[in-house]
Image (cartoon, grey):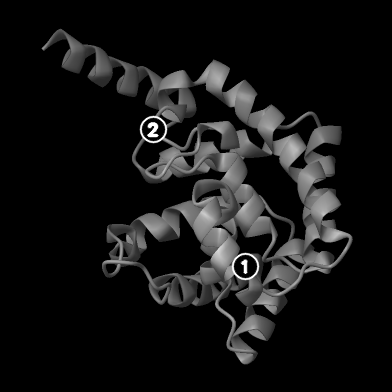
């Protein structure tokens, strides 16, 4: 199976799970927007090694066999920061984490947040369109990247987390910013040729709106 085929299979199963995530008040708007989901998930997946993708695909398949929805679990775990009181009431429904997992998650988050800070300095207008970086910025309407990562990574197997951390360390050894690579792919899918162009055009739109 090629990397392209593997990513397609991953996104298809992720979308199935995402579309089935229960939501108070009915499906969220994003659950009816497969195009945006596709862009975001593909941009991320392209930055992963084939070993990590294959391991994550196995996680998804095994979860489906056990009737676990990893997307539901991800958003439930995010509630530990966004809705802590409600989280206390549901956390017993979530599978326990391997003892090694929390430390691995924090190592991964530490690396990614450094990259995200660099991006926010280089491309502030593009980054303003996304999530805030830190969990301290969470509220009932907005979830930070840090909280999102902590929820998502907790759905990965120990095997996948170790492989993903190795991917990040390899990018670091090559002095590359993995978050930048993902964001570059994302903006290209929205019609921009580069992050520089996207940042310049978004800045222009914002300034025009403020001028109006």
Q: Residue at x 59, y 85 (%)?
A: 64
The residue lying toward the viewer, choosing from 192 and 142, is: 142
Q: Is residue 159 above or below residue 132?
A: below
Q: Within 10 Å of the Cα at label 1, are there few (<14), some (14-19), or many (20+) other Cα atoms?
A: some
Q: Is residue 180 above or below residue 124?
A: below
The quarter in which the N terminus is drawn is bottom right
Q: In which quadrant of the rendered view does residue 98 lie?
A: bottom right
What's the residue at 88%, 63% (across, down)? Answer: 99
Nearer to me, 9 or 193: 9
- Closer to the camera in the image, 72 or 119: 72
Q: Is residue 116 visible?
A: yes
Q: Position of residue 6 (x, y in %)?
A: 62, 72
Report x, y in % for residue 123. 49, 21
Q: Residue at x 54, y 22 (%)?
A: 120
Relative horizontal placement of residue 46, taking residue 158 as reference (left or right): left
- Find residue 129 and name its label: 2
Quick one: label 2, few (<14), some, or many (20+) residues within 10 Å? Answer: few
Residue 13 placed where, x, y %? 52, 77
Q: Is residue 37 left or right of residue 59?
A: left
Secondary structure at badge 1 equals helix
Q: Gap between marks 2 and 1, in whole Å?
A: 31 Å
User: Residue lying farthest top?
Assistant: 211
Side of 175 where 200 appears, left or right: left
Nearest to the eye among marks 2 and 1: give it: 1
Q: Quadrant of residue 163?
A: bottom right
Residue holding disc 1: 91
Label located before the other in sequence (2 or 1): 1
On-image quarter of the C terminus: top left
Residue 149 located left or right of residue 14: right
Asked if residue 74 shows in the view, the reply is no
């Amino acid at each position: 199976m090629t990397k392209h085929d593997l990513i397609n299979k991953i996104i298809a199963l992720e979308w199935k799970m995402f579309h089935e995530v229960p939501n108070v008040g009915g499906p969220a708007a994003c659950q009816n927007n497969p195009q945006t989901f596709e862009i975001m998930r593909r941009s991320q997946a392209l930055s992963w090694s084939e070993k990590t993708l294959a391991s994550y695909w196995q996680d998804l398949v095994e979860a489906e066999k056990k009737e676990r929805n990893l997307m539901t679990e991800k958003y439930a775990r995010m509630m530990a920061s966004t809705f802590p009181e409600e989280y206390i009431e549901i956390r017993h429904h979530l599978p326990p984490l391997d003892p090694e997992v929390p430390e691995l998650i924090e190592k991964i988050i530490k690396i990614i947040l450094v990259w995200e800070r660099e991006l926010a300095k280089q491309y502030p207008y593009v980054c303003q369109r996304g999530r805030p970086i830190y969990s301290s910025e969470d509220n009932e309407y907005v979830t930070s990247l840090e909280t999102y990562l902590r929820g998502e990574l907790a759905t990965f197997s120990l095997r996948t987390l170790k492989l993903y951390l190795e991917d990040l360390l390899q990018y670091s050894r090559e002095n590359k910013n993995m978050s930048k690579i993902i964001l570059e792919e994302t903006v290209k899918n929205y019609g921009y040729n580069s992050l520089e162009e996207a940042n310049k055009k978004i800045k222009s739109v914002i300034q025009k709106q403020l001028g109006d």
